[in-house]
Amino acid sequence: MIQTMLVIGAIDPLAIGGISILVIVMLGLVIIAIKYGSLWFEGYNCGAQIGLFELVMMGLRQVNQKSIMKAKIKAVQANLRTEKDKTPGEEIDGTFVTTQRLEAHYLAGGDVNKIIEALVASKNAGIALEFDQAAAIDLAGRDVVEAVRTSVDPKVISCPDPQRSGKEFLSAVAKDGVELKVHAQVTVRTNLEQLIGGATEETIIARVGESIISAIGSATLHSDVLQNPGMITKAVLERGLDSQTAFEIVSIDIASAIVGENIGSRLQVDQAEADTRVARAKAEQRRAEAIAVEQEQKAEVVGNQATLILAEAEVPKAMAAAFRTGNIDTKG
């Protein structure tokens, strides 16, 4: 017993501390291997080139390692350019999908899986799209995958859109006064270069609608538009309505055109009725003025008669005065 205590006491304290540290390190490595081993092994087999230390650091930075690993594996399997494709002396440009870029995009609040899906779709379609551009589109709140798909497969926008405006037709009047109600289909393709900061579908719908109304209003006869709707779409396309928008207009088609009211004839009838009412009012005014003049003349006649009666009443008085003064001689 005493010999055992002497042996233990003879052990160097530094050795004990080193052994403790080694045990802690080994225990930490075991924990790391248990927690990240399967994920690292999956990435290693797929050529993702994300080490255990990188996975640990991601965890410390509150990054979802599984999302980063799956995105990197998907990028490798799709033959996107990653760190392993870098040649000596080559700089990593926007075409590379690196672990650092994926992690930075995740920390910025982006969706790394959508970024990879968009890059894969753009590569398969032969569209130039770099990682930084796709990340900027995603962080701007746009659906980058849908943007790439629309760039490859154009979509159709209704003008007007009943769901947005509650209207099914645009109403315009040709020079002959006949109203036309039209519904247009606008085929657009996403312009990836202007997707960030570019105007949205609402602007396209508003511009196209305004131009269609203007074009119909410039037509001499409504029948010309019905016989040749292409004259309207051609005039609209020539105006460059997709400028500063997130889309490129591929085509504009008049889906339906309905003849509405004859606005010109209705306005003429309304004008004639208004002219009739004005003429009646003026005639009534003249009649009232004539009646007023007649009444004034009657009043003047009555006044003259009263003056005559007063004058006649003065005659006997004048004769009597003349008799008294002897100015009238009654002898024959």
Image (cartoon, rainbow, N blue to C red):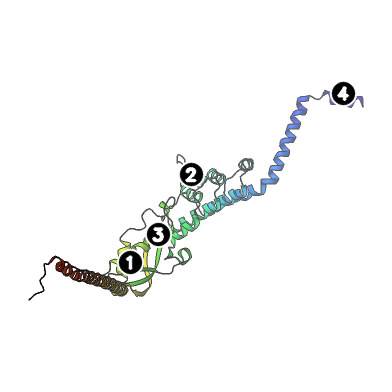
Q: Amino acid at mark 3?
A: Ile
Q: Nearer the viewer, residue 41 or 276?
A: 276
Which residue in the protein does label 3 denote? 204
Which residue in the protein does label 2 denote? 86
Q: Which is nearer the N-term, disc 4 or disc 2?
A: 4
Q: CA distance from mark 4 to mark 2?
A: 62 Å
Q: Quadrant of the N terminus?
A: top right
Q: Secondary structure at mark 3?
A: helix
Image location (x, y in percent) of residue 211: 34, 62
Q: How dense is the environment of label 3, judged by Cα within 10 Å: few (below 14), some, or many (20 and up)?
A: many
Q: Which is nearer the N-term, disc 1 or disc 4?
A: 4
Q: Which is nearer the N-term, disc 2 or disc 3?
A: 2
Q: Are marks 2 and 1 in contact (CB under 8 Å)?
A: no
Image location (x, y in percent) of residue 304: 21, 70
Q: CA distance from mark 1 to mark 4?
A: 103 Å
Q: CA distance from mark 2 to mark 1?
A: 50 Å
Q: Quadrant of residue 280?
A: bottom left
Q: CA distance from mark 2 to mark 3?
A: 42 Å
Q: Nearer the viewer, mark 4 or mark 3?
A: 3
Q: Are marks 3 and 1 in contact (CB under 8 Å)?
A: no
Q: Nearer the viewer, mark 1 or mark 4?
A: 1
Q: Nearer the viewer, residue 3 or 160?
A: 160
Q: Which is nearer the N-term, disc 2 or disc 1?
A: 2
Q: Nearer the viewer, residue 38 or 132?
A: 132
Which residue in the protein does label 1 denote? 233
Q: Secondary structure at mark 2?
A: loop
Outermost residue on the right side: it is: 1
Q: Are marks 1 and 4 in contact (CB under 8 Å)?
A: no
Q: How dense is the environment of label 1, judged by Cα within 10 Å: few (below 14), some, or many (20 and up)?
A: many
Q: CA distance from mark 4 to mark 3?
A: 91 Å
Q: Amino acid at mark 4?
A: Leu
Q: Find residue 6 and name its label.
A: 4
